[in-house]
Image (cartoon, rainbow, N blue to C red):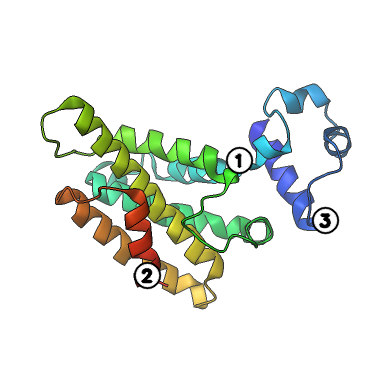
Amino acid sequence: MKAKIIENYILHYNRNGKMPVSVFAFCETMEMHESDFYNEFADFNSLESQVLSQIWSDSLQKLQGQEYYEECSNNEKLLSAVYAFVENLKNYRSYLLLKYKDWSNPLDQMSSMNGFKKSFFSYLESLEFENKGIGIQQVDNLLEKGMYHALFTNLSFVFHFWLKDTSQGFEKTDACIEKSFALSFQLIANNSLSTAFDFGKFLFSNFK
């Protein structure tokens, strides 16, 4: 039901360029009860915060169980997931261009990305990236959290880049993914991802 509601919401937004006037009106077009909507979402804003998360989850589902993916290293798995995610974004480009048309700075992550961020962090936890800590648990936990935020900043930057990309087949986005995540993995290996903000500024200045 959740995926169906999101799908119909995106269809409405593409056709009208804005949210439905009410949950009642939206549910009426779907021939479902309002309670069905509220079982999944508190309002349209909470629904929008789950759109990217749903696209991410769908992308991961397509990878899971595939032999080549299961045999990959953690870095390769993350990179495969990012490529799959960007490929899946194409199915929703009209909606995403409308929704994020005023998103000018990729370092300013929009509230509609909160659900996506949570899903991405859960995925990173499942990969169990090796964190070269210093042996003090509280400090090591902060370093790991910083790494997660920096990787999400990287992914947000790629998403923002893709929204602006007009190259054939989004080939420039593919190059951006390869170069920016290669840098991320290098910094992780060197334990140099101290803050997501500093990393984001570096990406913004070097991969425009």
Where residue 66 sits in the image (x, y, percent)? 35, 44
What's under tag 3, amino acid-wise?
Answer: Asn
What's under tag 2, amino acid-wise?
Answer: Ser
Q: In this orientation, which residue lies closer to the viewer: 194 or 25?
A: 194
* Circle on res. 49: 1
* Above or below for 88 versus 169: above
Q: Which residue is mark 3?
A: 16
46 relative to 8 in the view: left or right:
left
Disc 3 vs disc 1: Cβ atoms closer than 8 Å? no
Q: Which residue is mark 2?
A: 205
Q: Residue at x 71, y 49 (%)?
A: 10
Give the quarter of the figure containing the N terminus: top right
Q: Name the N-terminal-most of marks 3 and 2.
A: 3
* Above or below for 68 versus 23: below
Q: CA distance from mark 1 to mark 2?
A: 28 Å
Q: Name the N-terminal-most of marks 3 and 1.
A: 3
* Circle on res. 19: none
Q: Residue at x 37, y 57 (%)?
A: 200
